[in-house]
């Protein structure tokens, strides 16, 4: 049998005919005229090379072939109905869905704890796998293997969707006994030794090139605009580690303010505004077009955005 020649509407008619055993009743059930149902029965007889329904003294009776077809047709109709049903909304309260997200160390320290507070209340059974940008590639995200990535992006594939989560300013941190605390200005900043921290981009990272100012990030790019350069003593990829290392007596750490506030209760640290203008940084969320309309994915994206905007 050539599937190209099968009319699914005929199968719907057959399902009702076998249930009702009456052309008139089947027509009424489907809201069509009796002649239209009679024509459907005629086409079904040709399609299956079988009378399907035969008139007897006790009314219309299904043939043996029709009796064999009946459960199969019923299951087929139910399957088609399930396929074409609108996608159900995501039910976070009862879902145990597994989400995989890649986030920078900065976002993991600042944003993710707030997201987990929200999820704990609204979707207590979902599971979140937190990865770093080094763990995944753009291809992983594009193929939907990772739900989304939170980071700053110099460029993204055109097929990706993205949204801005927040802007952040910068703060300078240093040990309270650092000699420049009481004389903190641009010159003392430049004379000091600095901690550099960042992990942006996707895929396996490579070593830092101290001469490649543009790839060092906002702070060094802003200094370069002034024709200046700071003395970086230590390069690290982890904000939490950097905020511990800055207690080393002579180091200065310049990081996004939201991250700096995580150590605001440390009495050994001093927090000061940078002595030069640094453009605000952006934190973005990006995801694949393959997951854009997925109800569960859409729910977590909106939750992430709401948490970020209310931070």
Image (cartoon, helix red, strand yellow):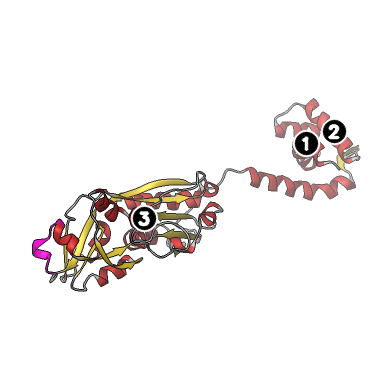
Q: Quadrant of the N terminus?
A: top right
Q: CA distance from mark 1 to mark 2?
A: 10 Å
Q: Which residue is mark 1?
A: 7
* Precedes in sequence: disc 2 or disc 3: 2
**In the image, 137: left or right of 195?**
right
Of the image marks 1 and 2, the number of the one nearer the N terminus: 1
Query: Given this view, does label 1 or label 2 mark the residue nearer the observer?
Result: 1
Q: Residue at x 26, y 72 (%)?
A: 245
User: In terms of image quadrants, where is residue 195?
Assistant: bottom left
Q: CA distance from mark 2 to mark 3?
A: 71 Å
Q: Which residue is mark 2?
A: 43
Pinpoint residue 76: horizontal percent, then vertical percent: 74, 47
Q: How many numbered marks have been drawn onto this rendered protein structure?
A: 3
Which sits in the foreground, 237 or 90?
237
Q: Which mark is residue 161?
A: none
Q: Secondary structure at mark 3?
A: helix
Q: Is residue 231 visible?
A: yes
Where are the magenta residues, as a range?
Answer: 179-186
Q: What kind of element bears circle 2?
A: helix
Please tell me whether mark 1 sits on a helix, a strand or a loop: loop
C-alpha separation, residue under disc 3 versus residue under disc 1: 61 Å
Q: Position of residue 217 (x, y in %)?
A: 32, 55
Which residue is identified by label 3?
215
Question: Are the residues flagged by discs 1 and 2 in contact, CB closer than 8 Å?
Answer: yes
Query: How many C-alpha atoms fall within 10 Å of the one at disc 2: few (<14), some, or many (≥20)?
Result: some
Residue 90 visible, this orientation: no
Q: Earlier in the sequence, mark 3 or mark 1?
A: 1
Q: Nearer the viewer, residue 143 or 196?
A: 196
Is residue 136 found inside the magenta-colored segment of the image? Answer: no
The one of 218 and 33 positioned closer to us in this rendering:
218
- The percent coordinates of residue 112 (x first, y second) are 36, 60
- Left/right placement of residue 101 relative to residue 116 reads right
């Amino acid at each position: 049998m050539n599937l190209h020649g099968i009319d699914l509407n005929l199968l719907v008619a057959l399902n009702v005919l076998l249930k009702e055993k009456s052309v008139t009743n089947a027509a009424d059930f489907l809201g069509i005229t009796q002649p239209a149902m009679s024509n459907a029965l005629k086409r079904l007889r040709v399609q299956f090379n079988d009378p399907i329904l035969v008139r007897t003294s006790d009314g219309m009776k299904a043939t043996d072939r029709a009796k064999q077809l009946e459960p199969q047709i019923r299951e087929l109709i139910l399957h088609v109905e399930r396929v074409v049903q609108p996608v159900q909304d995501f039910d976070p309260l009862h879902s145990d869905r597994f989400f995989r997200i890649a986030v920078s160390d900065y976002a993991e320290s600042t944003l993710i704890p707030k997201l987990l507070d929200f999820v704990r209340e609204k979707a207590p059974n979902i599971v979140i796998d937190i990865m770093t940008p080094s763990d995944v590639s753009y291809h992983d995200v594009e193929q939907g293997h990772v739900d989304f990535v939170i980071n700053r992006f110099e460029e993204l594939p055109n097929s990706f969707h993205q949204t801005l989560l927040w802007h952040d300013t910068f703060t300078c941190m240093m040990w309270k006994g650092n000699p420049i605390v009481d004389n903190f200005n641009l010159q003392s900043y430049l004379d000091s030794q600095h901690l550099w921290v960042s992990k942006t981009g996707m895929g396996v990272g490579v070593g830092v090139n101290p001469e490649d100012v543009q790839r060092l990030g906002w702070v060094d790019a802003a200094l370069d605009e002034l024709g200046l350069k700071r003395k970086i003593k230590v390069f690290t990829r982890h904000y939490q580690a950097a905020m511990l290392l800055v207690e080393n007596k002579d180091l200065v750490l310049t990081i996004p303010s939201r991250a700096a506030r995580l150590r605001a209760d440390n009495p050994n640290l001093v927090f000061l505004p940078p002595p030069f203008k640094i453009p605000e940084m952006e934190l973005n969320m990006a995801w694949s077009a393959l997951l854009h309309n997925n109800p569960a994915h859409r729910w977590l994206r909106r939750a992430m955005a709401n948490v970020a905007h209310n931070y």
